Image: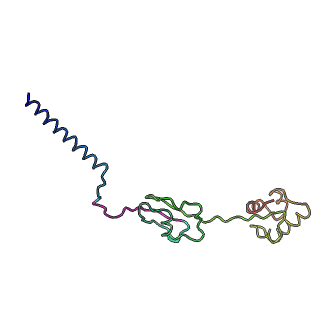
C-alpha cells in the first residue's frame, strides 16, 4: 500500500512539475518582451508626403511620429492649407499625407451696384460689355437673376457660365 502511495505521489509531483513548467513557458511567450536579435535598431515606418511641399516623397520616421514631424522634413510651402489637416495625428506605416493649397476666397461683385471698372474685372467681360451692363441697368433697373444678363448683346451663355460664381444681386 505504501508503494502505491509513493508511486501516486511521484506521478502527481511529475505532473505538477510539467504543468508548472508549461504555465511558466506560456507566461514568458505571452508577457515577457523578448529582444529582437534580427533588428536592434529603432522601429521605423514609411510615410508618403505630396502636394504643397517643397520635397515630396517617402519619408522614414520612427513609430509614434506625428504629421507635424513629417511636414517639417518635407518643408511645407507658403500656400499650404494646414487648417484642413490634423497636425497632431500619429502616423502609421504606409500613411499618405496630401497637402492642398489654400482655397482662394472668391470676392463677389454685385452686378447692380458695381462700376464699369469693377465689372470689367470679371472673366469674359470686356470694358465695352461692362459699359453695356451699366447702361442697361440705368435704363431698365436692377437685374434680379443671372439669365437677365443675356439681354446684353455681347453676353452669351458661355459668358454667364464663367461669371456666375463671381456675381451677386
Q: Could you tell whether 167 is left or right of 132 in the image?
A: left
Q: Nearer the viewer, residue 134 or 168?
A: 168
Q: How far across and how far down the image is residue 98, in percent?
A: 53, 62
Nearest the eye: 147 or 3: 3
Is residue 60 shown left or right of residue 124?
A: left
Number of numbered discs visible in the structure rendering: 0
The quarter of the image holding the N terminus is top left
- Identify the residue at the far right of this view: 139
Magenta stretch encompasses residue 161 = no
Percent from the top left, x then y, of residue 143?
85, 59
Q: Is residue 38 left or right of residue 133?
A: left
Q: Is residue 1 above or below residue 115?
A: above
Q: Which residue is drawn at 78% across and 65% down?
A: 109
Residue 13 % position (x, y): 16, 38
Q: Quadrant of the C terminus?
A: bottom right
> For the point 73% across and 62% down, which residue is it?
162
From this view, report whether residue 137 is shown above or below residue 12.
Answer: below
Q: Residue at x 64, y 64 (%)?
A: 103
Query: Which residues are drawn in magenta?
Result: 37-50
Extreme-front residue of the structure:
2
Left/right of residue 42 with respect to residue 99 in the rendered view? left
Amino acid at each position: 500500500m505504501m508503494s502505491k502511495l509513493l508511486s501516486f505521489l511521484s506521478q502527481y509531483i511529475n505532473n505538477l512539475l510539467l504543468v508548472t513548467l508549461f504555465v511558466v513557458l506560456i507566461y514568458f511567450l505571452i508577457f515577457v518582451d523578448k529582444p529582437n536579435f534580427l533588428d536592434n535598431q529603432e522601429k521605423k515606418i514609411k510615410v508618403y508626403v505630396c502636394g504643397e511641399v517643397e520635397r515630396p516623397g517617402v519619408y522614414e520616421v520612427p513609430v509614434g511620429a506625428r504629421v507635424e514631424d513629417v511636414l517639417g522634413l518635407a518643408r511645407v510651402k507658403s500656400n499650404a492649407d494646414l487648417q484642413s489637416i490634423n497636425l497632431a495625428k500619429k502616423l502609421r506605416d504606409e500613411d499618405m499625407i496630401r497637402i492642398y493649397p489654400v482655397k482662394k476666397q472668391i470676392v463677389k461683385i454685385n452686378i447692380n451696384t458695381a462700376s464699369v471698372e469693377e465689372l470689367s474685372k470679371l472673366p469674359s467681360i470686356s470694358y465695352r460689355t461692362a459699359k453695356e451692363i451699366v447702361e442697361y441697368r440705368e435704363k431698365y433697373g436692377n437685374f434680379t437673376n443671372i439669365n437677365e444678363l443675356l439681354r446684353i448683346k455681347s453676353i452669351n451663355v458661355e459668358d454667364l457660365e464663367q461669371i456666375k460664381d463671381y456675381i451677386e444681386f
